[in-house]
Amino acid sequence: MERHERPWGYYEILATDNMTQIKKLVVRDQQQLSLQTHEQRDEYWFISSGIAFITVDDYEESFTAGQTLQILRGEKHRVKSLQGDLVLYEVQVGSYLGEDDIVRYEDNYGRA
């Protein structure tokens, strides 16, 4: 399994077919992904361990192990690890699942 390092932690692709991709994301303590949208996919998040602070448009809430969330294409979203490393599983569903289907609005690491 290939590990993809990011400034916030890393992800691994667990499975892919023509309309679905499953990733394991590990977000390091107090790190967060960019505030972003996707135009061609929806995402379903399952929190495996840790405490996540999740933003989707104007909604913000903490999530813990066992909780799930649906993020529809076009919704601005991000996740932050609040305590220790956060492990979440992301199921992507859509006509295109490439990493270039990300529009970033805010990013702590200077990525465009």
Image (cartoon, rainbow, N blue to C red):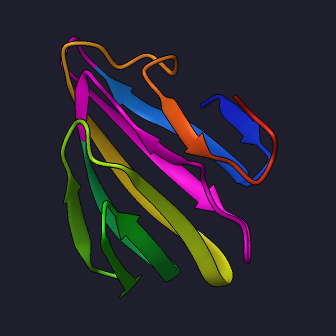
Q: Residue at x 36, y 84 (%)?
A: 61
Q: How many marks?
A: 0
Please provide percent x and percent y for residue 69.
23, 65
User: Is 3 drawn above or below residue 62 in the view shown?
Assistant: above
Q: Residue at x 76, y 39 (%)?
A: 5
Mark yes or no: residue 64 visible.
no
Task: Tell me if 17 is positioned left or right of 104 in this view.
Answer: left
Please provide percent x and percent y for residue 94.
19, 23
Quadrant for residue 84, please give it.
bottom right
User: Is 40 drawn above or below residue 52 in the view shown?
Assistant: above
Q: Residue at x 42, y 71 (%)?
A: 54
Mark yes or no: residue 95 visible.
yes
Quadrant for residue 43, please give it.
top left
On the rendered image, what quadrant is the N terminus found in?
Answer: top right
Please provide percent x and percent y for residue 14.
43, 36
Viewer-side residue, 30 vs 88: 30
